[in-house]
Image: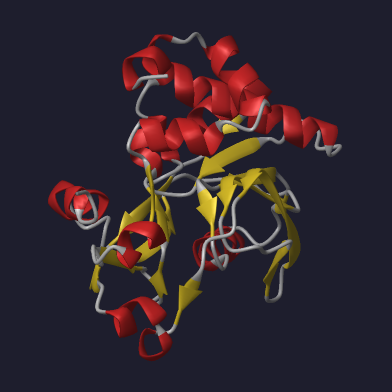
Amino acid sequence: MLKEDILALTADDVRLRLDAGELIDIATLLHAFWRYDYDAAKDGRLGLHALLKSGLHSDGFFVSRILLEPERMRRAIALMMVDRLKKAGVARPDYVVGIPDGATKLGTLVAEIFGSQEAKMKKDGKRIVMDSVVPSGATVLLIEDFCTRGTGFIEAAKEVKNQQPSVELVPYDPVIINRGGLESVDVDGVGPFTVLALVNNRIQDWEGEKCPLCEKGSGVIKPKVNDHNWKLITTAQLP
């Protein structure tokens, strides 16, 4: 299929394709997912690889903003997330929060589908902070776009509990892609959260001084800083 064909699909058609395990293929067609081409490297096209927010180097990267930009795609993924949560026994939460910035709009749709209220978080510099008041005793579901080591989820969970200690956080971390292989995220003083992913797709990462791609001569770049960097990394190994 071509990008135009994907964008023409209905939300139900997208769900069928995602159920068939095509999410990574669709994300790649939409230029939302990149993976280092080891075959091209053997031919001398060493290209670039990703510098993650954690400081680790990686051979894959996912930009949820691009994947979730089409409303039909966003709705299909939200519907699938709610389906997975219900199958896991999760009842309708009082509030749903999409962790910024990647899952903000996704959280809006998940709240709508569940019939829950939406609470907002925002980025304040490099910090994630609450931008809504959640009442005492409410149940709150946090939504993520992807999971590597759970850093963003842990920060968001702690922020919610700091603002309102009596809220009950739903013990799941729903994500589109689990790229780090985690089965659960442990939040100190709060508890464990089971990672509930639409797709488990392990991507390798390394400390910079141990990066085999650097050793081969591949350059490293922050893919998400701007559109220019994303274009550079996705085209660096083309013939």
Report the side of 94 relative to 70 (left or right). right
Q: Quadrant of residue 209?
A: bottom left
Q: How is the image coloured?
A: secondary structure
Find residue 236 and report its horizontal and vertical position in percent. 20, 56
Total numbered badges shown on the rendered structure = 0
101 vs 26: above or below: below
Is 105 in front, or is 158?
105
189 vs 150: above or below: below
Find residue 1 and report its horizontal and vertical position in percent. 42, 19
Is 52 in front, or is 203?
203
Farthest residue, direction right: 89
Residue at 36 percent across and 40 percent down: it is 32
Residue at 49 percent across and 34 percent down: it is 25
Residue at 32 percent across and 85 percent down: it is 215
51 vs 30: above or below: below
Q: Quadrant of residue 158?
A: bottom right
